[in-house]
């Protein structure tokens, strides 16, 4: 469901939740509700809800009596109920959470019960203490989001909300470049009006995640992101390139990003191995796929810019010169709507000498 400007929290929640509550109660076989079942025909009238706040409360209470818990299978209703029930949230924060609905609904591996429980108890704290360059942080141990900067557009909150759904004891051990890259790519595809213009704090992490998506498929990337098991990617890559080579490849990527995060240029030996392995992989696995190769070539050239310590300025210049590659990876809406193409023709390659 798309939340429209001007719709109030109560209007949205009542419209969306009422039908599922009714169907759930019928499923559970409530005698009390079945006796009143004819009343449900009059709940809607030209898409306008005809049910009072008191009657909504009765429906919730009845549902809990019959099921023993808030057991609604529709992800959209779960998110809405969680946000509405959470006393720690402002209406503004709830409206941001509502935008998570499509993402949660489309994630095949997410633990939706855990996501519901997290959202129902989540705290969002706006603090002014100095955290160096950190803009926001999610602590999965106490289920709190900390926002350290003014966030008028809720961009930091969106990023940390996605972390709150996926970070746990298993996924916290994922490589940082991978965890942040997938998170920010999800923010772009599910929250942004300009999903391909990656003017973010993690442009290179996103480029690397896109390369991995092109290598092993977006579905496997989501499974890894959700389970925390990097061996899924390693095993798929090893089918084409061998175990030893693949382990070295993934270590090189980790090292490159660790150095870059420390404001250093990526190690040239790591970069050389990354390019050699990646080029060979795409040649072996996708010898006839121009679309996959075009996407890889574009993102590869971005990764090469990490050889400079001024990589973020180089990234902006690269976009100015080459445009941005339009290719969705996760959002079903974007995948259906957009074709793979270049916003500005990418007709040249940068030659790098080592």
Image (cartoon, grey):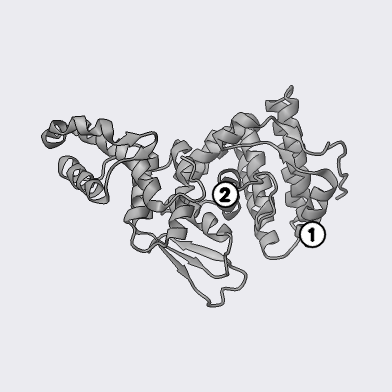
| In the image, residue 300 above or below residue 312 | above
Residue at position x 59%, y 51% from top?
Answer: 184
Label 2–label 1 contact, CB within 8 A: no
Residue at position x 69%, y 29% from top?
Answer: 339
From the viewer's perspective, is 238 left or right of 299? left
From the viewer's perspective, is 206 left or right of 46? right
Residue 149 lies in quadrant: bottom right
- Could one spot residue 248 in this view of the protein? no
From the viewer's perspective, is 286 left or right of 154? right
Q: How many marks?
A: 2
Which dot, 2 or 1, sits closer to the camera? 2
Query: How far from the left and from the top, in percent, is residue 287?
Result: 73, 24
| In the image, residue 30 above or below residue 156 | above
Q: Which residue is mark 1?
A: 313
Query: How far from the left and from the top, in percent, is residue 141?
Result: 39, 62
Residue at position x 52%, y 49% from top?
Answer: 5
- Mark 2 neighbour density, 10 Å: few (under 14) some (14–19) many (20 or more): many
Q: Which residue is mark 2?
A: 187
| In the image, residue 312 above or below residue 105 | below
Lower position in the chain sequence, tag 2 or tag 1:
2
Query: How far from the left and from the top, in percent, is residue 289?
Result: 72, 24
Residue 25 lies in quadrant: top left
Element carrying mark 2: helix
The Cα–Cα distance between marks 2 and 1, rounded to whole angstroms, is 22 Å
- Mark 1 neighbour density, 10 Å: few (under 14) some (14–19) many (20 or more): few
Query: In this view, which residue lies farthest toward the top?
Result: 288
Residue 331 lies in quadrant: top right
- Could one spot residue 317 in this view of the protein? yes
From the viewer's perspective, is 34 left or right of 19? left
Element carrying mark 1: helix
């Amino acid at each position: 469901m798309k939340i429209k400007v001007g719709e109030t929290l109560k209007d949205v929640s009542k419209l969306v939740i009422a039908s599922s509550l009714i169907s759930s109660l019928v499923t559970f076989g409530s005698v009390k509700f079945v006796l009143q079942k004819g009343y449900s025909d009059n709940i809607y009238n030209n898409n306008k809800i005809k049910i009072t706040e008191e009657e909504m409360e009765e429906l919730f209470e009845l549902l809990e009596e019959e099921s023993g818990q808030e057991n609604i299978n529709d992800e959209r209703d779960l998110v809405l109920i969680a946000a509405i029930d959470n006393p720690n949230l402002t209406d503004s924060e709830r409206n941001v959470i509502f935008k998570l609905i499509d993402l949660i609904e489309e994630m095949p591996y997410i633990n939706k019960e855990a996501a519901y429980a997290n959202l129902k108890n989540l705290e969002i704290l706006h603090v002014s203490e100095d955290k160096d360059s950190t803009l926001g942080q999610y602590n999965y141990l106490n289920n709190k989001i900390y926002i350290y900067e003014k966030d008028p557009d809720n961009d930091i909150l969106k990023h940390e909300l996605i972390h709150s759904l996926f970070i746990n004891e298993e996924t916290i051990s994922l490589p940082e470049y991978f965890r942040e890259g997938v998170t920010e790519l999800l923010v772009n595809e599910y929250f942004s009006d300009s999903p391909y213009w990656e003017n973010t704090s993690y442009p290179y992490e996103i480029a690397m995640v896109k390369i991995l998506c092109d290598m092993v498929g977006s579905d496997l990337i989501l499974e890894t992101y959700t389970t925390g098991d990097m061996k899924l990617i390693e095993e798929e890559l090893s089918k084409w390139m061998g175990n030893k080579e693949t382990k070295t490849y993934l270590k090189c990527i980790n090292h490159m990003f660790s150095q870059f995060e420390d404001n250093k240029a990526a190690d040239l030996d790591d970069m050389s191995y990354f390019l050699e392995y990646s080029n060979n992989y795409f040649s072996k696995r996708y010898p006839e796929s121009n679309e996959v190769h075009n996407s890889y070539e574009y993102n590869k050239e971005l990764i090469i810019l990490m050889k400079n310590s001024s990589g973020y300025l180089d990234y902006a210049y690269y976009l100015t010169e080459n445009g941005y590659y339009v290719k969705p990876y996760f959002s079903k809406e974007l995948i259906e709507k957009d074709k793979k193409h270049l916003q500005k023709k990418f007709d040249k390659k940068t030659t790098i000498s080592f």
